[in-house]
Image (spheres, coloured by chain):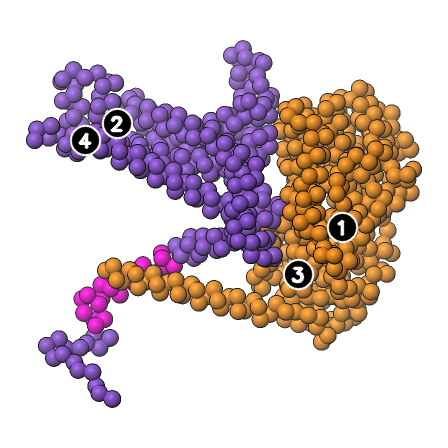
Chain colours: A orange, B purple
Amino acid sequence: MKKALSFVLAFVMSLALLTACGGSGNSSGSSGGKTDSSLPSYASLKVGEDYTDITAELRVITHRTDIIDTTFAKYVEEFNKLYPNIKINYEGITNYADDMTTRISSNNWGDICMIPTTIQLPDLGLYFHPLCQLSEIEADYNFAANRAYDGVVYGIPSTGNAQGVIYNKKVAEAAGYTTGNLPKTPDEFLKFLQDIKDKTDAIPLYTNFAAGWTMGAWDAYIGGGATADPDWMNITMPQTHDAFADRGDGTGPYAVYKILYDAVSMGLTEDSPTATDWEGCKPMINNGEIGVMVLGSWAIVQMQEAGPNAADIGYMPFPITVGGTQYASAGADYCFGVNNSISDDNKIASMLYIKWLTESSNFAYDQGGVPVLKSQEYPPTLAAFDGITLLEDTPAPTELATLQPDVNRESEISLNADNTHVQRIVEAVVTGSETFEDIIADWNARWNAAVDRCAPAA
Amino acid sequence: MKEPQVTLDRPKLTFIQKCKTMRGQQIICTITFLIVPLLLLFTFTYLPFFKMVQFSFYDRDYLRVRGFVGLRNYIDVFSRSDCFQALKLSLYYMVGSVVQITLALLFATILSFKVRGSKFFRGALYFPCLICGIAVGFIFKFFLNPGFVLDTLLGWIGITNTPNWLENTAINNIVLVACSLWKYMGQNIVLFIGAIASVDPVLYEAAEIDGANAWQRFKCIIIPSIRTIVVLNLILSVSGALSAFEMPYVVTGGTFGTSTYFVVMNKLAHTDMKVGLASAMAVVLLGIIVIVTFIQKFAEKKMDEAENRPRHYIADGKGGRK
């Protein structure tokens, strides 16, 4: 019997090894997808005119689980009027970034997905179909370079985000502020919060500490908005020592996080950070129980729809002024990518649908985002951004494409991915365990070590 | 070429004929029945484990391998301040697991004898084990937040000046340990009740006639009879304590100094994308658990030798006559 057992074990292992080898053989065979000239480029496709008789079934994977049966279903219906033979199925993933990263390594995950930002730019070609040359769409599209590498576009932005601050207009009015005199510097902002505390019953600044990822939003403000330098985030910062140091003039990453530290230590936030509730905060700000929340423009529509007072929700630029001018960072949300291991028909159908979504669906406007097409108009929610210079972070040049992600992760600060470093600021105040300067010193030390380790070979 | 000589007294069977013999049938059955569970075991346990060990020697994230780094990840695990800092938190959970086993033993002993409503209490005490750990985490999150259930309950009996259970670093780890104790104690109780039920009731009767009180019966009959189960539970609890994850991850998210080894590992692997380093952490933790288990086994053996009397004499009810 023992012999039999060992035989089975050996057999199973060799079987598993065989399948493992087979698997890797497959993927290496199809992963060398370079620009495929036999297919029309995304830019040259004319939606509604080209390929109207094409037949395909597409699986679209999205992070927007909330609107699959409503908004997206309506889009599919509209699109099918032009392309009746393209069948589109949506699949939603709640834990999108993590799950999609895992699934992307298999070839048959579907046809269209939102490209996970965990895939570094030089690797895009392994998984995604090269849509067109950057030069072809640069003039018409905002954020066209977001998911491009070496002049080839792999992803089309679904919508754009402007980084500002959500506030309740009624609460602001009661505290003596209108659109004309909104705070523009960190000091004015703290005064603004103090006024809300003194003159109303609302919680001035709601941190959304408990949900965690909501605090990660603070990282989005340390780029162009805080420095007026579009190169800062992707090119300069990952080569700069002491990137978090105090600049002394109320600008830069230091100033952004200092606002949070000061607001918590001055008692301008909720009583107990661990008791905050993400779903609960939406009706609260809608009803004027919360004054301000620091979240990207994607959150505006959710706050408006959480109660009867949609008109009270306002959006203002982040209160940092550089050299007398206020800037706001803007950038692409997730970008649509097309699987590079599907059939040519599916690729064409996928490109047609993406192009239709981008140019004809009005998705960005409906979601209160910055439009993707330069010719489209801004949604009314971004009205307070009139006169504010929107700055898009410049993508790193090809030879430095992995520098920012590498330094960012090597330092384990993981800007825009991790939230514990922002939560640490709140913890520091509540427990009194460390000062703000301690935190900054630690971040600088870790950042410096990562910069040294990842520095491009000279 | 010469044909190999075939011995005549044992006729050589063909493969098919071999399969048709009783012995052959047995082997075929064994193989076919074993192949499915073994394949599952291999694909979902051993293969990922070997892959993890392999990953731990590389600098890599999920999709991209940056290169072979040898032992650097292991050196990092031992030289970083946060990894072993996190293991210190496990001490809280280890102390908690001793308390948990003591309490479980107490409840199991009480419930093993005729107590009014013992069926109900058994069910009630086991119930938390049936709830998914994440759900238990959310229950406690709301239970413990300032102004919520616990504070209200304490307010009714006149205690109003309560600390913030989750933010006060002096107590928050103890509170979290209490939460895991609530969830996992039922499992120990069930095991203990099962073990106690297997003790020969004649022994209790004899002890009673000899005038032993409840404590003496517990100490001299129950404990020696179920010692193996107690030790097993201790091993399970200690390795559970080293790998505590659910409560700190769900209730506090590892904030306010409640970040256990697993929470640190999770952050490194999933947000910082240092898959190699996190794999090395996992291998190190495995090593620690194996060592702890060996120490316990060793101590158990020593205890056996020190007592110098085979346990089954008592359990058999044959007395000490030799």
The numbered dot on residue B308 is 4
Residue A168, magenta (yes or no): no
What amino acid is at disc 4?
Asn
State the separation of the CA atoms marked 4 and 3.
66 Å
What amino acid is at disc 1?
Asn
Residue A215 in the image: state x and y as whole percent: 69, 37
Query: On what subunit does the disc labeled 2 rest?
Result: B
Residue depicted at x 19% and y 76%: B13
Is B219 placed left or right of B154 in the picture?
left
State the separation of the CA atoms marked 2 and 3.
62 Å
Q: Earlier in the sequence, mark 2 or mark 4?
A: 2
Q: In which quarter of the image is the C terminus of chain B?
A: top left
The answer to whether the residues at label 2 and label 4 have Cβ atoms under 8 Å apart is: no
The numbered dot on residue A123 is 3
The magenta segment: B18-39
The answer to whether the residues at label 1 and label 4 have Cβ atoms under 8 Å apart is: no
Query: On what subunit does the disc labeled 4 rest?
Result: B
Residue depicted at x 53% and y 18%: B153
Q: Name the residue under label 1.
A: A234
State the separation of the CA atoms marked 2 and 4.
17 Å
Residue most toward the left?
B322
